[in-house]
């Protein structure tokens, strides 16, 4: 049914004190195998006597689920069965401990959780948590009666992101998920560290998040999930990047930090067949007499970003670009900026440097477009 070979260490069947079947050491034969240490399924005895398979609960312990391998299984299963889904018996309760999810980019995160189901696989109550992590992370869903609407409570990064989600189902079976969350006092670096990711910024974030997804299955909903978050971090710190040093050394050195009085912008995430794409737009940062604006995109561990640093009340703008691996991006400043700054210093110290730099930056872009480079020594 899965379309791949499967190896199982042992299977045990018992009738007392309740009917149960337990599978040990389940492993798919893949480059990144799906591994389940122990899976115990408890069928409903009354339904079983009526020759119907209905599961009261399933308990999963010590599992490793690589996202890429699961997608490969689903693709092969669809091809084998002409696109038809595997029939899964009804289930009342699912619980798992130490379930490790491996993302498209290879980041592994372990979770504990449990879920109670209503008919048609609607979660009645669900909890997801990161065991042993400080500050704690929990996600709780509670269904509102029989409606396809759930109250959502998230505790992460020492703050909260509460809200609600709504599911609409069309006559053809397609589903549309929508929702809103309100991040409040979420420490950005700590929140990302919860999922074993490094944040470029530290500080407590507040804002509003809108989420949406569509598809004919829960898997398709997950793969199409899109979020939009308008955020404010006040104050904030840019980690592992010293903007002042980057300007003074013309991008050759930038190790350090940059303190910001305020950071605002919009963060968009889009799940897809090849992982998540993260886009930041309308970024605006303030540090003393400096302001910066820009945009950035992170995908497959690579960053492409561009921005402008203004100071002296907007009299000068330094264009800056970042590109390359997220852990070690390359920083560059148009050479025309330095040429203009030198001209300004000669004509009029101080403010002349600022005006000349802005002119030089513009000239640098012009020369760049013509395939020429201004000579910074003249």
Image (cartoon, helix red, strand yellow):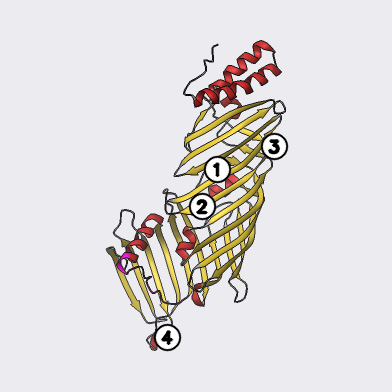
Q: Is residue 118 left or right of residue 182?
A: left
Q: Quadrant of the N terminus?
A: bottom left
Which residue position is annotated with label 3? 261
Q: Which residues are magenta?
A: 79-91
Whichever of labels 3 and 2 marks the residue nearer the N terminus, that label is 3
Which residue position is annotated with label 2? 270
Q: CA distance from mark 3 to mark 4?
A: 63 Å
Which residue position is annotated with label 4? 47
Q: Nearer the viewer, mark 2 or mark 4?
A: 2
Q: Tell me, yes or no, whether the two marked residues, 1 and 4, touch with CB atoms within 8 Å.
A: no
Residue 337 visible somewhere in the drawing: yes
Query: Crowding at label 1, few (<14), some or many (≥20) Cα neighbours within 10 Å?
Result: some
Give the residue displayed 33% in from the left and 57% down from the top: 33
SS for dot 4: helix
Whichever of labels 1 and 4 marks the residue nearer the N terminus, that label is 4
Residue 248 visible somewhere in the drawing: no
* Quadrant of res 279: top right
Give the residue displayed 37% in from the left and 82% down from the top: 15
Which residue position is annotated with label 1? 199
Whichever of labels 1 and 3 marks the residue nearer the N terminus, that label is 1
Q: CA distance from mark 2 to mark 4?
A: 42 Å
Residue 249 position (above or below residue 20)? above
The x, y position of residue 39, in whole percent, is: 39, 68
Whichever of labels 3 and 4 marks the residue nearer the N terminus, that label is 4
Q: Nearer the viewer, mark 3 or mark 4?
A: 3
Whichever of labels 2 and 4 marks the residue nearer the N terminus, that label is 4
Q: Tell me, yes or no, whether the two marked residues, 3 and 2, touch with CB atoms within 8 Å.
A: no
Name the dominant secondary structure of the magenta segment.
loop
Q: Is residue 20 left or right of residue 158?
A: left
Residue 171 position (above or below residue 176)? below
């Amino acid at each position: 049914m899965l379309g791949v070979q499967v190896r199982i260490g042992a299977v045990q069947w018992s009738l007392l004190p309740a009917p149960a079947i337990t599978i040990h050491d389940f492993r798919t034969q893949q480059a990144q195998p799906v591994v389940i240490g122990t899976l115990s399924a408890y069928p409903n005895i009354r339904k079983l006597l009526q020759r119907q398979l209905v599961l009261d609960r399933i308990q999963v312990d010590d599992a490793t689920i690589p996202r890429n391998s699961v997608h490969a299984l689903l693709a092969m299963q669809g091809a084998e069965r002409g696109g038809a889904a595997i029939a899964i018996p009804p289930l009342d309760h699912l619980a798992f401990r130490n379930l490790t999810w491996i993302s498209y980019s290879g980041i592994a995160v372990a979770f504990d959780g449990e879920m109670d189901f209503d008919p048609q696989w609607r979660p009645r109550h669900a909890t997801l948590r990161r065991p042993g992590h400080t500050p704690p992370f929990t996600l709780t869903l509670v269904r509102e009666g029989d409606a396809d609407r759930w109250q959502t409570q998230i505790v992460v990064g020492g703050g909260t992101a509460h809200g609600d989600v709504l599911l609409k189902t069309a006559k053809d079976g397609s589903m549309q998920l929508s929702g809103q969350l309100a991040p409040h006092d979420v420490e950005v670096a700590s929140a990302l560290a919860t999922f074993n990711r490094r944040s470029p910024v530290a500080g407590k974030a507040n804002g509003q998040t809108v989420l949406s997804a569509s598809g004919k299955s829960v898997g398709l909903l997950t793969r199409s999930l899109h979020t939009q978050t308008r955020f404010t971090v006040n104050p904030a710190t840019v980690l592992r990047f010293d903007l002042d040093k980057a300007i003074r050394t013309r991008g050759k050195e930038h190790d350090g930090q940059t303190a910001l009085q305020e950071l605002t912008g919009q963060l968009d995430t889009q799940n897809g067949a090849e992982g998540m794409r993260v886009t930041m737009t309308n970024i605006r940062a303030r540090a003393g007499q400096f302001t910066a604006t820009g945009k950035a995109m992170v995908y497959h561990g690579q960053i492409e970003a561009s921005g402008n640093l203004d100071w002296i009340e907007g009299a000068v703008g330094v264009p800056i670009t970042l590109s390359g691996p997220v852990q070690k991006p390359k920083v560059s400043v148009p050479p025309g900026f330095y040429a203009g700054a030198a001209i300004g210093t000669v004509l009029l110290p101080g403010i002349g440097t600022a005006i000349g730099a802005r002119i030089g930056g513009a000239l640098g872009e012009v020369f760049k477009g013509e395939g020429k480079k201004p000579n910074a020594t003249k």
